[in-house]
Image (tube, rainbow, N blue to C red):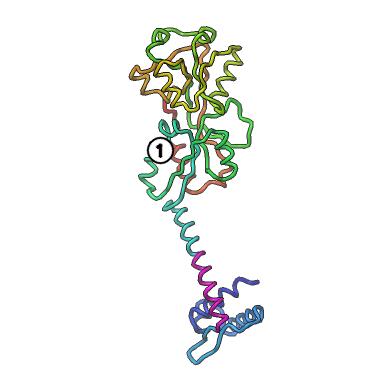
Amino acid sequence: MNLDLWKIFYEVATAKNISHASEKLHISQPALTKQIKNLEEYLNCKLFIRSQKGVLLTQEGRVIYEDIENALQLFQMAEKKIRADNELLSGTIRIGISTTLTKTYLIPYIRKFHTKYQNIIFEISTDPTSTLKASLKKGKIDFIIAKFPHSIKDEFQYKKLGQMQDTFIANHEYKDLAIKTLSLNELANFPILLQKQPSSSRDCFEAYCKENRIKLKTVMEIASSNLLIDFAKIGYGIGLVTKEYVKKELEQNELFEINITPKIPLRDFGIIHLDNDYLSKASIEFLKLLNEENDSFF
């Protein structure tokens, strides 16, 4: 079925005059009349009744006209939405990221972006990275901001934004240790707090321990880094956290960093995504902002 026939029908029905419709469509009146006849033959019904003032719709023609008009309104709405999204007048950016990384890294960028594009909505998902990757594959989120795994063996694309340092922290009860540099064997004598699996941080740390042939005594596995920090504050043990997450506590001497040797390697963090073709205009623009200010937040 030639969709141009429906356009011709709609214009004739709207103008109620074959001459006016032919001028608008830049089609000769005989050709337009023939096209209407072809459509009537295809549908096996009469669509127009000629009158002295022009043409009128039959009952069948009125039903078809209403359906086409409703469809055109939907097309126009879709066109306006796409245009608005392309002009960044509307849209949604769906990001997978941890709660802690949102607070310590992402919020300033959202604030800056929101100042310029106030109608763009942010949806934040804070599941474990493994769960977020599954959501990314299903198209439920646009991209992930996370610490990169110890080794990359998947189909995702990775764009580095900066680096982070994992470190051990403790409260004043362990203050004497803060002036020393402990070996891993010495550290193993103390109660250690680690983040519960699944955790890319935990995976990287276990790989580090394996490389150095050390097994630490873990007294508690904790689901979130925020809770782990809280337990360290009450002296429950020495916690492994990302240093950037406790910057304030370290500056205020609420917590102390425990230096160890060999030092835990720096970890890259950044954007994890599928092909760029899957990204919306709003997401691409936000990623440009992150890339333009591509620095660590030490």
Q: Which residue is at a point 58% across and 82% down the rendered structure image?
A: 47
Label 1 sits on residue: 109
Where disc 1 sits, the SS reads helix
Q: Is residue 154 above or below residue 266?
A: below
Question: Which corner quadrant of the image does residue 7 belong to?
Answer: bottom right
Q: Name the residue: 41% across, 30% down.
A: 104
Considering the image in quadrants, where does the C terminus appear? top left
- Amino acid bearing label 1: Tyr
- Relative to 228, 139 lies left or right: right
Residue interval drawn in magenta: 58-75
How far across and down, in percent of the image, does residue 84 sit? Answer: 44, 56
The number of numbered badges drawn on the structure is 1
Instruction: Judge from the rendering whether residue 103 lies leftward or rightward of residue 45; answer left or right.
Output: left
Residue in the foreground of this view, choosing between 129 and 88: 129
Is 66 a magenta residue? yes
- Check the picture and name the quadrant holding the N terminus: bottom right
Local packing at callout 1 (Cα closer than 10 Å; few below 14, some 14-19, many 20+) is some
Q: What is the x, y in percent for residue 126?
A: 49, 36
| Residue 288 painted magenta | no
Residue at the extreme bottom: 52
Q: Is residue 31 above or below residue 101?
A: below
Q: Residue furthest left?
A: 252
* Magenta-colored segment: predominant secondary structure: helix
Above or below residue 231? Residue 272 is below
Q: Position of residue 149 (x, y in %)?
A: 57, 28
Q: Residue 36: x percent and y percent?
A: 60, 81
* Residue at the image point whose x is 66% and y is 78% from the top: 42
Q: Nearer the viewer, residue 183 or 231?
A: 231
